[in-house]
Image (cartoon, grey):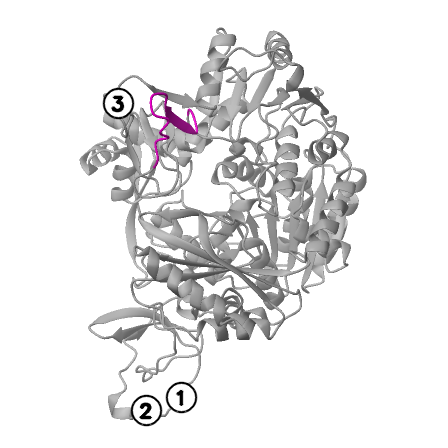
């Protein structure tokens, strides 16, 4: 099977010296040479004289049987061509390159004879990345300087130049290097997880613990057991900004840093990680969702931290849920899966209720920390000035924390300055030229940005519609506008804004998070980025600006996601010795979700939510698939969508229903019109087979794209 978009196996002659199942090979395909994997014996029904030979077998460990089975099953489940899955599993640079020596650059011990801005940039990159090594080009590019600057620093010893093999094993991790004295239910949960790893059999465990309950320390005990047995472990994190703090904890626990796999890692390190994982030279990998497709030699544990997080769903290319794929992968390599969360997804909660997953609960915070007190601020009784969003009650609470030398966090789940820019002369809302979406003002960048396609343009002086100047007005608050209000209300406070679009690199974002944790800000303003597991010891107040924001709409997961987000962001308060408080500004304090958040009656919320989903026959008590048709020709997509809805026999045969076609909620993205069909089916039916048979009835023109999303998480 090659990595090219050819959805069938190809026969080749074995090269001189032969090859075996699982070998990575270079093969000719037309005029090119491409990467492939030997999947088994050829069919043998072709004229041998016309079959081309494998060019060479790559000098990397072969793909194991468990990985091949996992890729096949993943392709079947997601209705993805197997070639795309193989490409996903070989996304590392330089796989064709033979083992060789290379020059790398690290931080040196010398001091430059003089310092220049360019030299400062190089040294800053090396300092930020610690022990990580760089090629000359990588270091120069990341610092934004010429290679001669790096070479000059190397001559003076400020940068160390070394000859080293391209790929070397990662430092050994010691399972008994250090540890934290666990207590009560933490100790019991850690013991059960260690026993699960020691069984060397597949199992999935929901590790549910309130925010700050020590879930990380508990599952690191499972990692320790995995290392003791000589097996490999994988920890998935939902956000790259979480890695810095987590890697420090791993190094403190095991005496060395693990391998990293995410978009912020250099190409040199990505190649090294891929090769060392396959050779057994990386015992622990910490990574993003794509780390699931690394070629582990003997994977014994997969941890999915913050398993409820929506970023685990891949929404472009191969559409898959990393949480579900982690469980699938573990079944093929006899590994334990730990799904850790304070607010698990309803799918995971339901599997635990049904006994499919084991459940371990951590009911109290670790050490001296206590759970925050949670209260609602009824905005119907608060008096707010025009274009202000911080209530007098919340303002007083923030001022009290600042005066006491503590930190306060203000949360709003909107990036940019304002979600809408309105013309007060004609009523026009400025939209994207390529999407049916409003453009968001980003005042720090002085631009309008489309959050769907990324299109940007300068903030106009006149209305694009009526050409009147001076009438454009921002409507509603974003994180930048809230920062403006905070600076006005608290002029002496140090303010930090955490939003992914405000940082040029993952490194800069990490630096800001570390600075906040060390007390570098009095008031933190953030989007949902701040809800993802960060630990700010001096943070004692969380204020949610608009707790009602996610409660409306037709998304079947709206209530679940609002509940999770509010509980997670509230959990940032009081994670050390000082008790915390969370205040939720709401116009609907009587709403069931708001009441559940404040009362802490989580099980009651999950049971009520589960009952509603069960009644409706939707996930996790039914199955869904989203079909999106897109084309530059709107009539083309509606014509095909209508035909698909009419010829739904293969779906009706399994009791499934087709809804649509209808314009997608965002009906045009990047200039392409989008039509959506939704398939709803009973839980235990062969949905994928029926979908395949249904779609095979239609000839899809080259101008039209069809994508299938099994178990969709979003309905845009």
Residue annotated with mark 1: 43
Q: Position of residue 182 (x, y in %)?
A: 75, 38
Marks 3 and 1 in Cβ contact (< 8 Å) = no
Magenta segment, which residues?
417-431
Residue annotated with mark 2: 46
Q: Is residue 411 left or right of residue 95?
A: right
Q: Position of residue 625 (x, y in %)?
A: 54, 60
Q: Position of residue 468 (x, y in %)?
A: 26, 21
Circle 2 crowding by C-alpha within 10 Å: few under 14, some 14–19, many from 20: few
**In what element is the residue under mark 1?**
loop
**Does residue 487 sit above or below 120 in this rendering?**
above
Q: Position of residue 243 (x, y in %)?
A: 51, 39
The kind of secondary structure the magenta stretch mainly shows is: loop
> Considering only order in the chain, which callout, 3 or 2, is on the residue closer to the N terminus?
2
Can residue 65 be seen by looking at this rendering? yes
Q: Which mark is residue 462?
A: 3
């Amino acid at each position: 099977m090659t990595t090219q978009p050819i959805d069938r196996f190809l026969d080749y002659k074995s090269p001189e010296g032969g090859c075996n199942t699982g070998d990575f090979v270079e093969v000719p395909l037309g005029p090119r040479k491409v990467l492939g994997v030997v999947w088994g014996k050829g069919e043998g029904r072709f004229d041998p004289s016309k079959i081309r030979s494998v060019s060479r077998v790559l000098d990397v460990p072969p793909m194991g049987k468990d990985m091949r089975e996992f890729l096949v099953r993943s392709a079947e489940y997601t209705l993805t061509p197997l070639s795309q899955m193989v490409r996903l599993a070989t996304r590392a640079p330089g796989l064709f390159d033979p083992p060789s020596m290379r020059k790398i650059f690290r931080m040196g011990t010398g001091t430059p004879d003089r310092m220049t801005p360019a030299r400062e940039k190089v040294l800053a990159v090396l300092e930020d990345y610690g022990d990580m090594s760089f090629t000359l080009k990588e270091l120069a590019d990341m610092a934004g300087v010429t290679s001669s600057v790096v070479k000059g620093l190397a001559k003076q010893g400020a940068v160390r130049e070394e000859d080293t093999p391209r790929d070397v094993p990662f430092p050994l991790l010691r399972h008994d290097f250090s540890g934290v004295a666990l207590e009560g239910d933490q100790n019991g949960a850690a013991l059960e997880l260690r026993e699960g790893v020691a069984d060397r059999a597949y199992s999935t465990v929901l590790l549910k613990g309130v925010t700050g309950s020590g879930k990380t320390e508990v599952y690191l005990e499972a990692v320790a057991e995995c290392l003791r047995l000589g097996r490999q472990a994988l920890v998935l994190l939902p956000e790259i900004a979480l890695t810095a703090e987590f890697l420090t904890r791993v190094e403190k626990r095991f005496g060395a840093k693990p391998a990293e796999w995410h978009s912020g890692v250099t190409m040199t390190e990505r190649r090294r990680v891929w090769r060392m994982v396959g050779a057994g030279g990386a015992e622990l990998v910490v990574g993003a969702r794509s780390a699931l497709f690394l070629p582990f030699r003997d994977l014994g544990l997969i941890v999915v931290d913050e398993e409820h997080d929506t970023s685990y769903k891949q929404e472009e290319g191969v559409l898959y849920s990393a949480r579900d794929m982690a469980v699938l992968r573990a079944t093929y390599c006899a590994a334990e899966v730990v799904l850790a969360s304070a607010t698990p997804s309803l799918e995971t909660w339901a599997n635990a209720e049904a006994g499919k997953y084991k459940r371990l609960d951590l009911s109290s915070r670790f050490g001296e920390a206590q759970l925050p007190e949670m209260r609602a601020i009824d905005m119907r009784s608060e008096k707010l000035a025009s274009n202000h969003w911080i209530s007098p009650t919340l303002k007083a609470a923030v001022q009290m924390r600042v005066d006491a030398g503590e930190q306060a966090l203000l949360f709003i789940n909107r990036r940019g300055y304002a979600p809408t820019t309105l013309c007060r002369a004609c009523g026009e809302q400025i939209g994207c030229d390529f999407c049916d979406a409003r453009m968001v003002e980003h005042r720090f960048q002085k631009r309008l940005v489309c959050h769907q396609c990324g299109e940007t343009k300068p903030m106009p002086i006149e209305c694009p519609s009526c050409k009147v100047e001076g009438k454009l007005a921002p409507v509603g608050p974003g994180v930048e506008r809230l920062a403006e209000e905070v600076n006005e209300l608290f002029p002496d406070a140090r303010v930090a804004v955490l939003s992914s679009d405000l940082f040029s690199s993952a490194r800069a974002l990490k630096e800001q998070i570390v600075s906040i944790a060390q007390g570098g800000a009095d008031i933190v303003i953030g989007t949902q980025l701040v809800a993802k597991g960060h630990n700010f010891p001096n943070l004692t107040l969380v204020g949610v600006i608009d707790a009602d924001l996610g409660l409306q709409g037709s998304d079947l997961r709206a209530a679940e996601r609002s509940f999770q987000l509010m509980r997670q962001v509230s959990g940032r308060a009081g994670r050390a010795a000082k008790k915390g408080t969370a205040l939720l500004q709401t116009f609907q304090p009587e709403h069931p979700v708001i009441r559940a958040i404040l009362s802490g009656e989580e099980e009651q919320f999950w049971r009520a939510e589960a009952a509603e989903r069960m009644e409706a026959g939707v996930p996790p008590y039914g199955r869904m698939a989203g079909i999106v048709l897109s084309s530059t020709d709107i009539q083309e997509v509606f014509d095909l969508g209508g035909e698909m809805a009419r010829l739904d026999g293969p779906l009706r045969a399994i009791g499934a229903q087709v809804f649509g076609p209808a314009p997608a909620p965002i009906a045009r993205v990047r200039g392409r019109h989008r039509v959506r069909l939704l398939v709803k089916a009973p839980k235990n039916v062969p949905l994928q087979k029926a979908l395949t048979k249904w779609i095979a009835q239609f000839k899809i023109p080259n101008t039209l794209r069809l994508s299938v999303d099994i178990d969709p998480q979003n309905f845009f």
